[in-house]
Image (tube, rainbow, N blue to C red):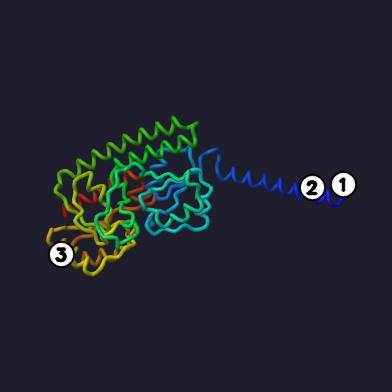
Amino acid sequence: MNRKQRVLFLSLLIILLLSAACSSAQQGAERVDGKLQVVATTSIVGDVVQQIGDDDIHLTVLIPAGTDPHSFEPNPQQIALLSDADIVFVNGFGLEQTLASVLESSVDPKKIVEVSQGVEPLAFAGDADHGDEEAHGVDPHTWMDPNNVIVWTENIERALSQADPDHAEAYHARAEAYRQELKALDAWIRSQIEPLLPLKVVTDHKVFGYFARRYGIEQVGAIIPAYSAMAQPSAQELAQLEDAIRALGVKAVLVGNTVNPQLAKQVAEDTGVTLIPIYTGSLSGPDGPAATYLDFMRYNVQAIVEAAQG
């Protein structure tokens, strides 16, 4: 073998070795212990996905608990997780606006599943000066009605079963069991809220639209008159809200765990109302009172009851 042949042989060998290494790395990234590699954007989406996937999937939640999903931006390691995932579950309806460009550039569109697909959306009736979601005209907080989360389970079950047909029966059984829990949750919420009607609530931002539509409460105002907690109210809007709180006799303001509470504290001091903490865009940590979606909703309903009773 002459020098030219040796160079050609070594070049081909290097190419083959590199190809094998890349292929092996890709397979390892896609499946660990033979499980689907799944990413969920929020802790709420992640909990519902885990209820259905259980031990048959390897789940990573992208946005840490307690972080506002409206403003989250991923780091390079998290972008790599998105790129390597078999399925990426997102809330949709414009919630993950800050992730839009990353998802578009890093993830095959066929791997992205919007869990809210099929939910009847609530349109935003205000002006478009208060945040990202208003430009889309849709309220993204679909999880505030457990009947919408039943729609989530159908989308999640379908996506997992298509990607991993060997476990389709297990996904279906767990999804069906979880749907029964969601129906029971819905009935319990009705039993708690109906005795309080008519009920008016004030929140830090417009998060209770789907809840209000389902259970008949009235969201009479929000400190931030927008669906995004990133928006900022004007002095005039704050003054109008405080006037409404006084006029309607509102006793408490519900403040979410992922927003800066300073504005709410100001309103509370000006009007004499009580601030009651709730969970809105994120679950609590595993040892907290809202570690699962079911706990999250029960905690919030109990907070609403407390606010109503003053």
Amino acid bearing label 3: Asp
Q: Nearer the viewer, residue 166 or 298?
A: 166
Q: Nearer the viewer, residue 199 or 22?
A: 22
Q: Which residue is mark 1?
A: 1
Name the residue at 52% across, 50% down: 83
Q: Give the quadrant of residue 259.
A: bottom left
Left or right, 270 with reference to 182 = left
Q: Check if mark 1's residue and mark 3's residue have beta carbons within 8 Å.
A: no
The answer, for residue 59, to whether it is visible in the render is no
- Quadrant that contains the C terminus: bottom left
Q: Nearer the viewer, residue 203 or 3?
A: 3
Q: Which residue is mark 3?
A: 243
Q: Residue lying farthest bottom?
A: 235
Amino acid bearing label 1: Met
Q: Along the polypeptide, which appears first: circle 2 or circle 1?
A: 1
Name the residue at 29% across, 60% down: 128
| SS of the residue under disc 2 | helix
- Tell me the mark number nearer the camera, choosing from 1 and 3: 1
Amino acid bearing label 2: Phe
| SS of the residue under disc 3 | helix
Q: Which mark is residue 257?
A: none
Q: Along the polypeptide, which appears first: circle 3 or circle 2?
A: 2
Q: Residue lying farthest top?
A: 169
Image coords of residue 303 (percent x, y): 24, 51
Question: In the image, is residue 259 above or below residue 299?
Answer: below
Q: Which residue is mark 2?
A: 9
The answer, for residue 4, to whether it is visible in the render is yes
Name the residue at 38% across, 55% down: 69
Image coords of residue 3 (percent x, y): 86, 52
Left or right, 42 with reference to 9 = left
What is the C-alpha distance between the residues marked 3 and 2?
82 Å
Image coords of residue 177 (percent x, y): 35, 33
